[in-house]
Image (cartoon, rainbow, N blue to C red):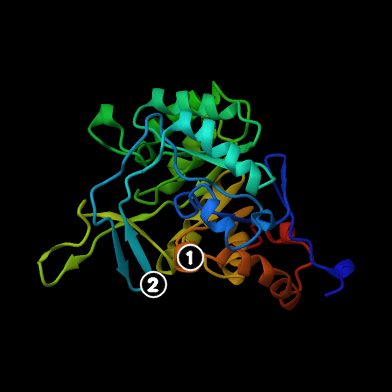
Amino acid sequence: MDTACRPDMSVELSGLRLDNPVIPASGTFGFGAEFAEFYDLDILGSFSFKGTTREARFGNPTPRIAECREGMINAVGLQNPGVETVIAEELPHIAKIFHKPVVANISGFSVEDYAYCCEKIDAQEQVGIIEVNISCPNVKHGGMSFGTVPESAYEVTRAVKAVTTKPVYMKLSPNVTDIVSIAKACEEGGADGLTLINTLLGMRIDLRTRRPVIANTMGGFSGPAIFPVALRMVYQVAKACRIPVMGCGGVATARDVIEMMMAGATAVQVGAENLRNPYACKEIIEALPAEMERLGIARLRDIIGVA
């Protein structure tokens, strides 16, 4: 293809220019090292690194992965080395394999946890966007996820914004009755953007043992099967809020990326597909120009929210 006529795949997220909208989702790409063995990570728009907490976490007991038709269930339990180690060891390694701003995914079990981790990660030059996962259980309120109640979502957003200077994107759980009310609470709390959706809650049963496959009983259901749900929620939130959205959930092809952007997403995260096919993001990025030409799209940013 003549580069002079090549479709423009660039997008802008809160002042951050991305060469393309494709971003591997947190929890499916580690800290990038394993995937750097397969391809040059600099072709990505960015990537969201593994969910990071204040203290190191071993994660949930095994088994914590279950296969499903058109997807998978996982209950890894935020296994990570803790924010101090991520800053001291993981970010320097990321700098050797990825030469663009990275998305830092932060998790917590109290408002104080979120604020502490976000303030620490905000000071790191490599971090372009802070993505705050509010699907974690609030240990001070009986384990209910921060992202299931507008008041809690607002409280976390306000606390994080008070200690950060970089764009903050709140990652929303789909396991709610009204995703728009949660999104609007985050917007009112000062969020610069939103990421949705996180995984749906699911489970499998082993027919021979008659017990749940996952040691934790239930886990996060992801994969192509959830794409229509994710698309619907992105559409609803993008229509209701003025801040940008990163769409996530079941994305597996270049056409999925385009459809998600038409629903209102400015950038699109690819999750479970990375685990099935480590070349997924590379293949999607390579396929985008031809799909854009077929659909008569000169600039991807022109289709955001056209639906």
Under tag 2, what secondary structure? loop
Distance between mark 1 and mark 2 Cα atoms: 10 Å
Q: Earlier in the sequence, mark 1 or mark 2?
A: 2
Q: Check disc 2 and give the amino acid type.
A: Glu
Q: Which residue is mark 2?
A: 70
Q: Nearer the viewer, residue 95 or 182?
A: 95
Residue 100: x, y in percent?
A: 69, 45
Residue 299 vs residue 164: left or right? right
Q: Which residue is mark 1?
A: 273
Q: Nearer the viewer, residue 224 or 84?
A: 84
Q: Check disc 1 and give the amino acid type.
A: Glu
Q: Nearer the viewer, residue 182 or 245?
A: 245
Residue appearing at x 34%, y 31% in the figure:
109
Quarter the C terminus occupies? bottom right
Residue appearing at x 62%, y 65% in the figure:
282
Asked where in the image residue 57 lies, by quadrant, the reply is top left
Q: Considering only vertical position in the picture, is 159 above or below 24?
A: above
Residue 53 vs residue 241: left or right? left
Label 2, residues with CA under 10 Å away: few <14, some 14-19, many ≥20:
few
Label 1, residues with CA under 10 Å away: few <14, some 14-19, many ≥20:
many
Residue 80: x, y in percent?
A: 40, 40
* Front of the two marks 1 and 2: 1
Residue 60: x, y in percent?
A: 26, 46
